[in-house]
Amino acid sequence: MSPADVVRLSKRLSYVLRHRPDSVGLTLDDAGWVGVDELLGALRVTRSQLEEVVARNDKQRFALDGSGTRIRASQGHSVGVALGYAPAQPPAELFHGTTQRFLARILVEGLRPGARHAVHLSPDVGTARAVGARRGPPVVLRVDAAAMVAEGAVFSRSANGVWLVDAVPPGHLAVLAAP
Ligand code: HQG
């Protein structure tokens, strides 16, 4: 497949496996998995095309189970699934990329998950900057994860390295200068 075809199929997979499985007649199980054969039939793609997208995906968004018979998105869902990631000890600092126009509200309310299940945090500034830049001039916030853990917040880490938490209170956020 060409790089453009890989991106196109990746976007379709994200849409179906995170947000609208019903749009192609699929139902996810409680943990977000769907049978690979069912998915291939619903999207009319071949197994080798699917495997290529899973392998070449820039952010490893999709995961096959151990047997290779089921697939799911590793995070980012808006449909109700329990991904079952174990609570994990985050690094002392994590980062969140956003854009200027959301900043005032975030500094009052803290970070909220919006349409997704969890707030997504990055382990490094560069990734956070790229996430923020999707929406406009990026702003990077530093999250005091150590202080949140001390207060009882539960973090988990998705299969592709994104840190997930229910919310981040404004007191544990700091705007990075010149991220
Ligand atoms: C903002 C992509 C106002 C938040 C990326 C963000 C990531 C608030 C937007 C992954 C707010 C939500 C997730 C508040 C948060 N007031 N705005 N209180 N709290 N926001 O897309 O983190 O390509 O749901 O800053 O790379 O941007 O899909 O979350 O700008 O890893 O795999 O509300 O999605 O990965 O946007 O991105 P999103 P996100 P994929």
Image (cartoon, rainbow, N blue to C red):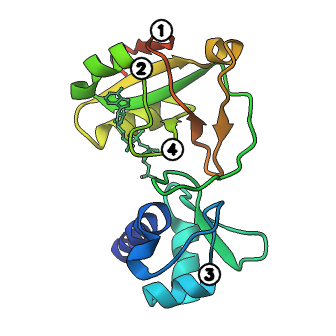
Helix, strand or loop for disc 2: loop
Say whether disc 2 or disc 4 marks the residue closer to the N-terminus: 2
Q: Are marks 2 and 1 in contact (CB under 8 Å)?
A: yes
Disc number placed over residue 117 in the picture, else none: 4
Q: Which mark is residue 171?
A: 1
Q: Could you tell me residue 154's position as x and y percent? A: 67, 28
Inspect the image, locate mark 1, and give the three-letter code of the amino acid beneath it: Gly
The response on whether ligand 1 sits within 8 Å of label 2 is yes
Q: Position of residue 141 (x, y in %)?
A: 42, 21
* Residue at x 51% of width, y 90% of height: 41
Tell whether circle 4 marks a residue whose Cβ is less than 8 angstroms from ligand 1.
no
Taking 39 as reference, is 131 left or right? left
The residue that disc 2 covers is 110
The answer to whether residue 155 is seen in the rendering is: yes
Q: What kind of residue is marked 2?
A: Gly
Residue 15 pos. (x, y %): 40, 65
User: What residue sits right under mark 3 in the picture?
Assistant: 36
How crowded pointer 2 is (Cα within 10 Å; few <14, some 14-19, many 20+) is rated as some
Q: Give the alpha-carbon distance from disc 3 to disc 4, as whole Å.
A: 24 Å
Q: Nearer the viewer, mark 3 or mark 4?
A: 4
Identify the secondary structure beneath mark 3.
helix
